[in-house]
Image (spheres, helix red, strand yellow):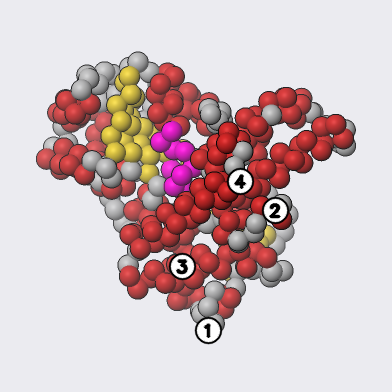
Amino acid sequence: MNIKRKIHHQLLIWKDSPKRKPLILQGARQVGKTWILKHFGQEYFENTAYFNFDQQAELKQLFVTTKDTKRIVQNLSLIHGKAILPHKTLVIFDEIQECNEALNTLKYFCEDAPEYVIACAGSLLGIAMSRGASFPVGKVDFMQVYPVTFSEFLAEADSNLYAYLGSLVKIGPIPDIFFHPLVDKLKMYYISGGMPESIVTLLEKQDVEKTQQVLQNILNAYTLDFSKHVENKNIPKINYVWASLPSQLARENKKFLYQSVKQGARAREYEDAVLWLINAGLAYRIYCSTKPALPLSAYDDLSAFKLYLPDIGLLRRLSLLDPIAI
C-alpha cells in the first residue's frame, strides 16, 4: 500500500532548492521516516544509497577517521557497491543520532560538497541535542514527520470521499450520503491511528486484532527506548508519566497534575521525565492560553499545560480502549 504523504511536496521543494543543505527528518519511531525517504529516492533519483548507523555500527569509523567529504563518499560508494553521484544519488543516513561524528560531518557536506544530496532520519535526535551533543547549527535543513493525518488516511481508504471533501469550499451541513461513510472512516482512523503499519494492517488485511498487536508492538518499542536511552534512576519516572497520560486526559483537570502521576509526586522530581518524552516526540506539551489573541504563544500560561500523545491510535491502545467501544 502506497500511502501518499503530503511531506513529499516539501521534499521536492528541498530537492530543487539552489540553497539545499543536508536534510534531517525528525519524528517519533514508526511514523514512516525511512519509508518516506526510500520512496522519495525511488521516484526522483537514479539511485538511492541507504546506510543505517544502528544496524551497521562499523559505519561510524568512516566518520571518526576523517572529515574529508570526498574520502567519505568514496568509502560509502564501496560499501554501497555503486558510485554515489552528485545530484543523481540520494544518500540516506538512518538512525543518525547513533553517530555524533556523522552529524558533525553534515557541516562539511554543506560547505564543501553541496552537490551531494543527503537526507538523514533520526527518532531520538531531540534527546541527543538536549544532552548537548555537538551539532552543525545552521548547516542543515529540518523537516518534521508526523503520523498519517485523517485526510491522508481517507485518500487511501476511500478516494471518492477524499475527493468530495477536497471539493468543499464552505462550512455547512454534509449530506447523509457522504456524512455516514465519512463517520465510518473516521471510526476506522480512531482504531488504527496514524502509524503507517497499523493503517496498512487495518485497510489491507481488514484485521482488527492484528492492528491491535501492531500498536502494542509500537508501544513496547517506545518503552524499550526508555530503558535504552535513559539513566536507570529516571526510567521509573518516565514510565509513571507515560502511563498516566490517558487518565490525565480523561479527567476534567485544566492542567497536567504531577500528583496524579504518583502519590506525592512533585514537579521538580518529574519535570525531566516530561521533558524527555517531549524531546523524544512521544508527547506534545500544549499550554493553556489566557487570551485568544495573536500571537497565541504570548498569552501562554506556562504553569498550566496538558500532555497529548502524538497519535490517536496509540492513545486508544495505551488507554486499553477496545476497538468495539469505537
Q: Which residue is mark 2?
A: 324
Q: Earlier in the sequence, mark 4 or mark 3?
A: 4
Instruction: Name the disc covering residue 239, or none.
Output: 3
Q: Residue at x 23, y 26 (%)?
A: 80
Q: Spot the residue most to the bottom.
A: 264
The amino acid pointed to by label 2 is: Ile
Decide if residue 71 is in sight here. Answer: yes
Q: CA distance from mark 4 to mark 1?
A: 39 Å
Tell me if label 2 and label 1 are in contact, CB under 8 Å. Answer: no
Q: Residue at x 33, y 39 (%)?
A: 94
**Front-most of residues 165 and 15:** 165
Disc 2 secondary structure class: helix
State the extent of the magenta-drawn residues as a range.
Answer: 26-35
Q: Which residue is mark 4?
A: 208
Tell me if label 3 and label 2 are in contact, CB under 8 Å. Answer: no
**Front-most of residues 229 and 301:** 229
Decide if residue 311 is in sight here. Answer: no
The amino acid pointed to by label 3 is: Asn
The amino acid pointed to by label 1 is: Gly
Disc 1 secondary structure class: loop
**Front-most of residues 133 and 297:** 133
Q: Residue at x 61, y 46 (%)?
A: 208
**Within 10 angstroms of label 2, few (less than 14), some, or many (20 or more) residues?**
few
Disc 3 secondary structure class: helix
Instruction: Name the disc covering residue 264, or none.
Output: 1
| 263 in relation to 79, above or below | below
